[in-house]
């Protein structure tokens, strides 16, 4: 028996090297999901989802969540546009069916609230991190400037997910106030909603409308900028 024969099991048919375990002919590799570095300071997925819902999840290769948020908010936007552009024809159909004209208005309110909730949930989901990740807080002027552009964005950069959700929800509320108080909305209500309650008449008063349209945004932006900058300064 020579030296090469000692390295093989000669009792089995088709001798294989005794010192090597059986392995598959091709290595099995799975495509890894998006992994964040052990130290990260800027919420890239959350920032992407802030401006394009679902893109942050797609960046993290969470395809199902990304497609869900993107398609859901797109569907709600298309539904709102369809109701608004065909409202004059809907009024005739609803009158024929003896259905209140308030029904499509409440549908629009529900769609708006659902879109706001989905957007906030999408951003907070994209900002979720592993507990082992060390978060690097950016300089105070960076989150302050980010919250000056979009309230809540600076809180996301700081990793304050709860505060970011509060400010983003407030941004949607301010947008709703501006939409309702816009000239187009006022003309729409005067055309299709002729009878309004006492509380609606109070809200339509110029002083109340001006206060709601300007005081709320100033408070929201001021608090968001101060909170983002001060939180970053305290953590550094």
Image (cartoon, helix red, strand yellow):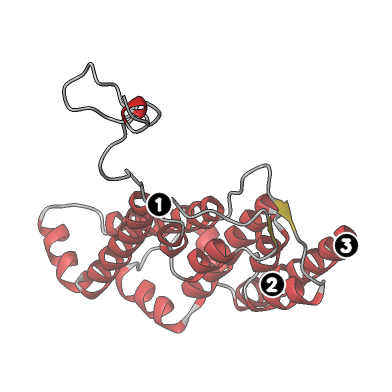
Query: Closest to the observer: 134 or 139?
Result: 134
Of badges 2 and 3, nearer the viewer stands 3
- Name which quarter of the figure residue 55 lies in: bottom left
Name the residue tied to disc 3. 236
Q: Position of residue 225 (x, y in %)?
A: 76, 71
Q: In the displayed structure, does residue 145 sit left or right of residue 57?
A: right
Q: Farthest residue in the top direction?
A: 11
Q: Secondary structure at mark 2?
A: helix
| Tag 1–tag 2 contact (CB < 8 Å) | no
Residue 117 in view: yes
- Name which quarter of the figure residue 22 lies in: top left
Mark 2 surroundings within 10 Å by alpha-carbon count, few (fewer than 14), some (14 through 19), many (20 or more): many
What residue appears at the point 72 percent right and 78 percent down from the top-left corner?
Answer: 145
| Alpha carbon separation for disc pair 3 and 1 | 32 Å
Of badges 1 and 2, nearer the viewer stands 1
- Name which quarter of the figure residue 222 lies in: bottom right
Q: In the displayed structure, does residue 221 sit left or right of residue 49?
A: right
Of mark 2 and mark 3, the one earlier in the sequence is 2
Name the residue tied to disc 1. 62
Of mark 1 and mark 2, the one earlier in the sequence is 1
Q: Farthest residue in the front direction?
A: 1
Mark 1 surroundings within 10 Å by alpha-carbon count, few (fewer than 14), some (14 through 19), many (20 or more): some
Name the residue tied to disc 2. 147
Query: Closest to the observer: 92 or 223?
Result: 223
């Amino acid at each position: 028996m020579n030296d090469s024969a000692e390295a093989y099991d000669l009792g089995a048919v088709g001798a294989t090297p005794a010192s090597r375990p059986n392995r598959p002919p091709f290595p099995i590799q799975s495509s890894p999901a998006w992994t964040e570095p052990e130290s990260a300071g800027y919420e890239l997925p959350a920032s992407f989802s802030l401006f394009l819902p679902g893109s942050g999840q797609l960046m993290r290769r969470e395809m199902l969540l990304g497609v869900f948020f993107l398609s859901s908010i797109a569907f709600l936007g298309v539904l709102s546009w369809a109701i608004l552009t065909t409202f004059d024809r809907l009024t005739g159909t609803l009158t024929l069916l003896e259905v209140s004209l308030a029904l499509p208005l409440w549908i629009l309110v529900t769609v708006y609230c659902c879109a706001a909730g989905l957007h906030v949930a999408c951003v907070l989901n994209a900002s979720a991190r592993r507990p082992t990740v060390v978060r690097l807080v950016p300089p105070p002027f960076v989150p302050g400037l980010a919250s000056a552009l979009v309230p809540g964005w600076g809180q996301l950069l700081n990793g304050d997910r709860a505060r970011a959700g509060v400010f983003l929800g407030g941004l949607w509320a301010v947008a709703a106030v501006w939409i309702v108080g816009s000239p187009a909305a006022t003309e729409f209500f005067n055309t299709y909603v002729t009878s309004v309650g006492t509380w609606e008449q109070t809200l339509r008063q110029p002083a109340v409308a001006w206060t709601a349209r300007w005081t709320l945004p100033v408070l929201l932006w001021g608090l968001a900028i101060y909170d983002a900058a001060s939180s970053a300064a305290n953590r550094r």
